[in-house]
Image: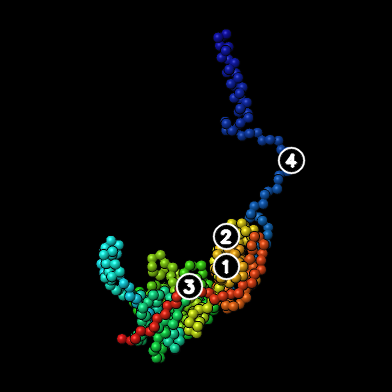
Amino acid sequence: MRRALPYVWPILIGLLLAIVLLNAFPRLVGRQATPPVATSPPPQPAPLQTADEVERPAPSLREAPPMERGEGPASYASAVAQAAPAVVNVYSSRVVERDSHPLMSDPFFRQFFGDDAPRRQRMLSSLGSGVIVSADGYVLTNHHVIRGADQIQVALRDGRETLAEVIGTDPESDLAVLRIDLDDLPVIELSDSDQAAIGDVALAIGNPFGVGQTVTMGIVSATGRSHLGLNAYEDFIQTDAAINPGNSGGALINPDGALVGINTAIFSRSGGSQGIGFAIPANLARSILEQIVTQGRVVRGWLGVEAQELNPELAASFGLAAPTGVIIAGVVPDGPADDAGLQPGDVLLKVDGNPILDPRQTMSDIADIAPGTDLPVTVVRGGEPLEITLEVAERPTPSRPLSLEKPDSP
């Protein structure tokens, strides 16, 4: 008996512990707990409002009217018939000289011949398009189509061909004016390109890849395109009408057959059309045409400064609240800005009372000011605003204008 006593106490303690656990957790043996005595329920907190139960009036929305699907023309043949005869092919050629033997490019061999080394000439040709805009024979095309050319030939749709005279070029807008001497010339009508709207149907006419006159259709994708780095002065009409090499200088027309722009460039990773083409607006082309014909050059206003755009960091360093204006990075000696006392490091904030929000647009606005005009500007120097008046000068020609005499007919 005494030997069993050491085992009894642990058994009893285990039984008591089991009874306590079973009473505390009746689910362990599948029994239901004894329901508590009914008492008044404690106050329940108010339920949280969910998003579905928020009470607020419905928003007021503007309902669009049903879309009107008016039928457009089934064909643009009449527009093409009116405009296409005035679109011409422009063939430019130039003579280049090169060494008669590849070894002549090596300085070791060239020293035996000097400047009298034999050279041979080669004719390089390029293809573009142009648009007859006057019965006097004036043709608009791109500057890059005829750049460096020694001879320019124009071919009309009716089969006539003639040599062209260069009246003048404007590299900063990539436009050139030619003149041909033929009778009964077809002439295109010029539209007010300011009225061109995104979504308008546009037709591009030119000679892509030299396959012959071709018409492609699209819409006006955007207007006022700039900051593309193509020209000094940019105000392009963007279109998805297919424009390919050879279309440069051709016509972008509306469904009435009137000129909307001069096709100029494409954005492409492959060299072919990817639906992003650019045309110089007809209004800008008209202005440049008239200046080149009447004055022999394009006259633009000029301040004689080299400007750099402001970013937020630079604006903060100059104590400006917003990155508006431009930094004058350089001043042309004896130019209008230099004569008026502007200095590198000045921040140009306003021109003629208008804040500079887009430096390129401001550059274009200054170009439209007649030389000799007094122009008030606002600059910040050393944190202090200054009011200065400049006399606008004529912008110097960036390069010598191309001037070709009309060669004698063969």
Say which of marks 4 and 3 sits in front: 3
- The amino acid on which the numbered mark 3 sits, given as a three-letter code, is Pro
Location of the C terminus (image quadrant) = bottom left
Q: CA distance from mark 2 to mark 3?
A: 28 Å
Q: CA distance from mark 2 to mark 4?
A: 71 Å
Residue 16: x and y, percent? 61, 22
Most foreground residue, 409 or 241: 409
- The amino acid on which the numbered mark 2 sits, given as a three-letter code, is Asn
Callout 3: SS: loop
Callout 4: SS: loop
Mark 1 or mark 3: name the one nearer the start of the chain: 1
Look at 73% across and 43% down and name the residue there: 43
Name the disc covering residue 358, or none.
1
Position of 269 relative to 65 (above/below):
above
Look at the image and tell me whether residue 199 can be seen.
Answer: no
- Circle 2 residue: 311
For mark 3, does the 10 Å Cα neighbourhood hold few (<14), some (14 to 19), or many (20 or more) residues? few
Callout 2: SS: loop
Look at 57% across and 31% down and name the residue there: 28
The picture quadrant where one finds residue 34 is: top right
Please say if the residues under marks 4 and 1 sit with CB atoms less than 8 Å apart.
no
- Circle 3 residue: 398
